[in-house]
Amino acid sequence: MRAALFEAPGQPLVIGEVEAPQPQPTDLLVQVKGCGICGSDLHLSALADRSSGMAPLTPGAIMGHEFCGEVVEVGAHAPGQWHEGDRVCALPYISCGHCVDCVSGRGHRCREVVYSGMGNLGGGYADYVRVGGAEALALPDGVDFRAGAMVEPLAVGLHAVRLAELRPGDGVLIIGAGPIGLAVAHWCRFFGARHVVISDLAAGRLAKAAALGATDGIDASTEDVVGRYKQIAGRRAEVVFDCVGVAGSQQLAMDYAPANGRLVIAGLCMQQDHYMPVKAISKELSVQYVYMYERRDFELALEMLDRGRIDPGPMITDVVGFDAFSAAFEGLKTPSEHCKILLDPQA
Ligand SMILES: [Zn+2]
Ligand SMILES: [Zn+2]
């Protein structure tokens, strides 16, 4: 099968031919129909050592954890009622399935977990991917493969908003109009935020934000964020989301928050960072870090997609085949107006 192979940190992915994965008895083999490029893959592909706590990729690794596709093989003991031809997405890992974490929908906490797109479990930047029968979720009829590939990033946003404990009528400020920021905006609107304001350094990204639930955008390259937010909402935002995850972005969130405000740190910062604690202390800020999602986040995202209550369509800015995939991946390393680019192996 074809796959986009990691060769070395910082080097472009190389499209090559490799053996298709061998499903285990409890697995499904899925033909990939869509797989999003995630910011965390960009980070991962640049990682040269373990200083961030994450292991660098080994040569030949296949990334991609935002995938969906069609079942082409069902393991003899795969849990669930799966058949060839079923349309599925999946939690991007395979775990033991019976420990407390697995049973509660947090298989990524399982001691035996292996992640799709890392280590030796190949991900969705390929024609085929191995999926655990217990980790697969059926795509309802109303969810096509484009939307199916958006379930994972939508679940990231949903989980962040769930942990934000948003109250109806809250004002929200989201730092960063990338895929996570836009997914967060979508769900904040969905759950009744009064103001959903996104700040970003790229004006082009803000235009997209409006289609995805943001009520206003602030161009942080030219505008004073706090001043502008107050102009819009009459006061500071009750909840501030850091959806950037670079050194300095948590400090910004602290600066933007009001006294007794809530911060939700959703951006995956993999560098050393410095901040001034007294800012957060004197404001008595509550800080919530968020990571990944739970199975129920996938389930709700799928159901709301099926019923047409959410539409991630505007987040998808391009769909490419293998021929253009490596260049598209490289292109996302520099800031642009792209949001989510999907690989469609059949394109
Ligand atoms: Zn992702
Ligand atoms: Zn487990």
Image (cartoon, rainbow, N blue to C red):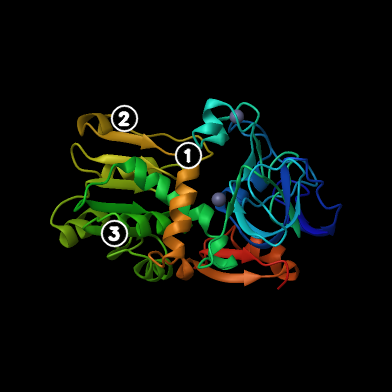
Task: Name the residue beneath numbered marker 3.
Answer: 197
**Within 10 Å of the Cα at label 1, are there few (<14), some (14-19), or many (20+) other Cα atoms?**
few
**Within 10 Å of the Cα at label 2, are there few (<14), some (14-19), or many (20+) other Cα atoms?**
few
Q: Is mark 2 within 8 Å of ligand 1?
A: no
Q: Looking at the picture, does residue 206 appear above or below residue 258?
A: below
Secondary element at tag 3: strand
Ligand 2 visible in quadrant: top right
Residue 50: x, y in percent?
65, 31
* Callout 3 amino acid: Val
Residue 266: x, y in percent?
43, 44
Q: Quadrant of the C terminus?
A: bottom right
Which residue corresponds to the image point at 51% horizontal and 37% vertical from the top-left? 105
Q: Earlier in the sequence, mark 1 or mark 3?
A: 3
Secondary element at tag 1: loop
Quarter-of-image position of residue 229: bottom left
Q: CA distance from mark 3 to mark 2?
A: 25 Å
* Callout 1 amino acid: Tyr
Q: Looking at the picture, does residue 229 appear above or below residue 323?
A: above
Which dot marks residue 277?
2
* Callout 2 amino acid: Pro
Mark 1 or 3: in front is: 1
Q: Looking at the picture, does residue 213 appear above or below residue 260?
A: below
Which residue corresponds to the image point at 86% horizontal and 54% vertical from the top-left? 18
Task: Name the residue beneath numbered marker 1.
Answer: 291
Q: CA distance from mark 2 to mark 1?
A: 22 Å
Front-most of 8 and 153?
A: 153
Left/right placement of residue 82 relative to residue 254 reads right
Q: Earlier in the sequence, mark 3 or mark 2?
A: 3
Front-most of 337 and 346?
A: 346
Residue 192: x, y in percent?
25, 56
Front-most of 273 and 257?
A: 257
Left/right placement of residue 21 relative to residue 226 reads right
